[in-house]
Amino acid sequence: MARYQLTLAYDGANFFGSQRQAKKRTVQGELEKALRGLGWTDRSALLSGRTDTGVHATGQVAACDLEWRHTDEDLIRALNATLPKDMAIWGAKVVRGDFHPRFDAVSRTYRYRLFCGALRDPMRERFAWRLNSALDDDLLREASQMFLGEHDFFAFGSPTSPNGTTARAVTKATWTRIEEDQWQFDVEADSFLYRMARRMVFVQAAVGQRKISAETIAESLKPTARRERSALPAGLAPACGLTLIAVQYQESIY
């Protein structure tokens, strides 16, 4: 018996999020079904965090205790043979017995994709947010720099526990123009509030379209902001554009 760390990728379009729910199709539910086919008998696999309905992943991390007498590569093949086509195991390795994919994580990285176009594009809109009007590259980059450092992100999401803090430390926030009409936003933080990444993108898109200034973001992150009425526009970027691409750990977990 050993504890395994599994790296998962999935197209979130047809999942009701990652966390198991009664009578709904979820990533955790499908993973546990595949594990039971290999003799796994525990009640619950562990996940590094929750992704909402429609959110994708290429670097979600799970952990489980499993008696497995073959190689890590054999485990990957055995699980992928029974998992649905919109989900796959990309990595498997033995870690220390008390490893927890959520509580041992030191940071997480999300990527958001969007593009501008007047007409619907079904092929791209499964994995990106379509905006009607163009974005200003310089304004996007200016907006992203406002998030760097440790701030109270209460205006950008809700805590992950009833009495949890809304303070988070963002170490990376960068925009890259992938094509003439397509951008991606990469953001890394010690952890994220619920819907924080999508809220960040929505507000930055408003800056890029000159609806608000980057300074409005800076004002919302000040310690005094809780006592003032927020000037940020209400809304979230759609889930379809968001992908969890990595969860980072210290080497001591192995």
Image (tube, helix red, strand yellow):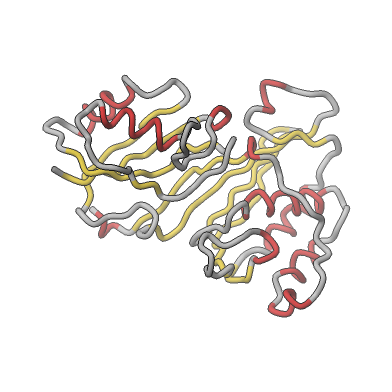
Q: Pick the residue in front: 111 or 88.
A: 88
230 with respect to 172 (left or right): right
Q: Residue at x 45, y 46 (%)?
A: 246
Q: Residue at x 70, y 70 (%)?
A: 221
Above or below, comparing residue 234 to residue 146 in the picture: above
Residue 183: % across, % down: 69, 40
101 with respect to 211 (left or right): left
Q: Residue furthest front?
A: 22
Q: What is the count of numbered marks?
A: 0
Residue 109: % across, % down: 51, 50
Q: Residue at x 40, y 34 (%)?
A: 29
Above or below, comparing residue 185 to residue 69 in the picture: below
Q: Pick the residue in front: 25 or 210.
A: 25
Q: Quadrant of the N terminus?
A: top left
Determine which quarter of the picture holds residue 9: top left
Residue 62: % across, % down: 35, 43
249 with respect to 218 (left or right): left
Q: Residue at x 22, y 35 (%)?
A: 40
9 with respect to 242 (left or right): left
Q: Pick the residue in front: 236 or 140.
A: 236
